[in-house]
Image (cartoon, grey):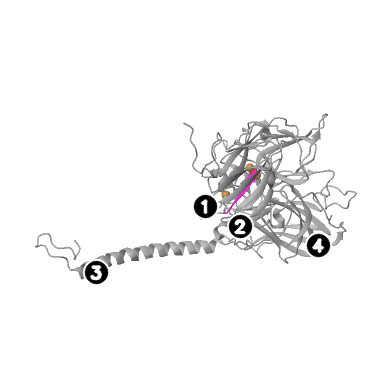
Amino acid sequence: MTPSEPSPYAPYAPPPRRRRRRGVLIVLGGVVSLAVLAVGGFAVFIAVSLLNAKVDTVGTVDFDRPLAVPPLAESRVEADGTRVFALRMQEGESDFGAPRPTPTWGFDGDFLGPTLRATRGEKVRVEVTNDVGETSTVHWHGMHLPPAMDGGPHQAIAPGTTWKPHWTIDQPAATLWYHPHPHGETAAHVRRGLAGMFVLDDAGSPGTTSTDDGPALPHTYGVDDVPLIVQDVQLEDDGRLDENGSFLSPVGLLGDTILVNGTPGPYDEVTAERTRYRLLNASSARTFTFTFSDRRSFALVGTDGGLVEQPSQLEEIVLTPGERAEIVVTMEPGERTVLRSAPLPERVADSNRLAGDDDHLDVLELRAADRLTPSAPLPRRLAPAPDVDPDDAVRTRAFAVSSQAINGLEMDMSRIDAQVEAGTTEIWELSARDGSPHNFHVHDVQFQVLDVDGEEPSPDQRGWKDTVSVRPGKQVRVALRFDLPAGTDEAADTPYMFHCHLLRHEDAGAMGQFVVVPAGRGSDTPDASDEASPTPRHHH
Ligand code: C2O
Ligand code: CU
């Protein structure tokens, strides 16, 4: 009984108001102090977590290992001209500098895979054998090809079996990549090491060879044309890969060990005046802002889907998971510089510390030899600019990405979210719905970024793209043309995917499916994922 309450046995008298108020105040005070304590404790906990959340490895990396360069995959050419590759997904272990070896997966090796290389117009077949004991798939990220060859979640490869997709290379010279895509397991399979590059050449392109019009970009693989597959991993004390990460991270697992082509603390012995680096962010969650320690500029020559129209000089480039950039770095004899990942530039977006945006990381040291092979000047023009005309668009679709859904719908392998008509152009409006950073990847097509938050795209987003950063509050509009890949006369019913390439989000359901149907059948949103009708329509 509180003091303010009258005794039930006494005749009724109005309670003394002041005392009652004081009683309420005392109780309130107690509740408030408890709450303050609780909130305060939580605030301290969050503050400490925030401080710890920032990773800074600048100056702490020894750069004492030569950069590994993935070998070029061997291939044979069959009588009909088909180039045939074989890849085996297998278990292994890697030395990432932990006291004990790290159990990893790789294609034809312990970690990552060989670089596949084919030329525009060529027929290819890849025979993929799964020896990792878990069902997986292999997706050709950035490739324009029939949906049944795409290697998405519908093309499962059971353990002990071989999958043999084949298609015709039907797109410009580009730096593509391959990785598993089993629904719900992509992050784990990629993080264990299943990833590799797929380089496309094009006989008429200065990316591949010099032409009548002028010189080529550096193109001697492993010498002045070097792949850089950049990943962050978190190592446990016993060497195993952490597979969970901090629960505070909105984006997924962020690691403090940076691997380049599977090498921790790598240096690259530079032997030419100009070196072309093919950067791939193969991390599952981390966004990198690549820049050099001396802020030297470099030439951006290619984006996800191929060469840009002309080189542009940049001091930094932001790559979200899945994105690629080809850059050319010029060095003087004997020079050294360090490729780093800097905090996210303000011009791009507000940084989210828990998403790793404030981190500062040493990546790779470049050491120029005392004598460098002379390099040709950079070609002035590299490729036609993307030419998707937004005025041709037959429809506009909106996709709002959250950490486990797109337009509020979780990925469902039996639901088609969008039906697109072959040969048509569409505009897709991409936004982030839940405050976390996201990105957006579309299978089969390379698209053109029209604008970001109403502004012209920056130089690094003006070329062909298949993956684009989508930050909270900044809508991205892209134009896509859905041509059928060469050798396909009929569009199929098998779907392609679109999804967030932050792999935890993708696995959790931030993915949808689209089909490309024959011209004349019309476009549609069969199961209502359109923002125009945000509540799913149910079939009765
Ligand atoms: Cu690189 Cu659907 O993925
Ligand atoms: Cu996401």
Name the spot of residue 292 as percent of width and height, x first: 72, 63
Of the pair 373 and 401, the residue shown nearer to us: 401
N-term mark: 1 or 3: 3
| 188 shown above or below 526 | below
Q: Which mark is residue 22?
A: 3
Name the spot of residue 497 as percent of width and height, x first: 62, 40
Disc 2 marks which residue? 256
- For the view shown, which residue lies furthest in the bottom direction? 18
Alpha-carbon span between mark 4 and mark 2: 28 Å
Q: Is residue 215 visible?
A: yes
Q: Amino acid at mark 4?
A: Met
User: Dot 1: within a 10 Å radius of its alpha carbon, few (fewer than 14), some, or many (20 or more) residues?
Assistant: some
Q: Amino acid at mark 3?
A: Arg
Q: Secondary structure at mark 1?
A: loop
Residue depicted at x 86% and y 48%: 209
Contact, CB < 8 Å: mark 4 with mark 2? no
User: Dot 3: within a 10 Å radius of its alpha carbon, few (fewer than 14), some, or many (20 or more) residues?
Assistant: some
Q: Amino acid at mark 1?
A: Asp
Q: Secondary structure at mark 4?
A: loop
Mark 4 vs mark 2: give the one in front.
4
N-term mark: 1 or 2: 2
Alpha-carbon span between mark 3 and mark 2: 54 Å
Alpha-carbon span between mark 4 and mark 3: 77 Å
Disc 1 marks which residue? 434
Name the spot of residue 354 as percent of width and height, x first: 54, 58
Contact, CB < 8 Å: mark 4 with mark 3? no
Contact, CB < 8 Å: mark 1 with mark 3? no
Disc 4 marks which residue? 331
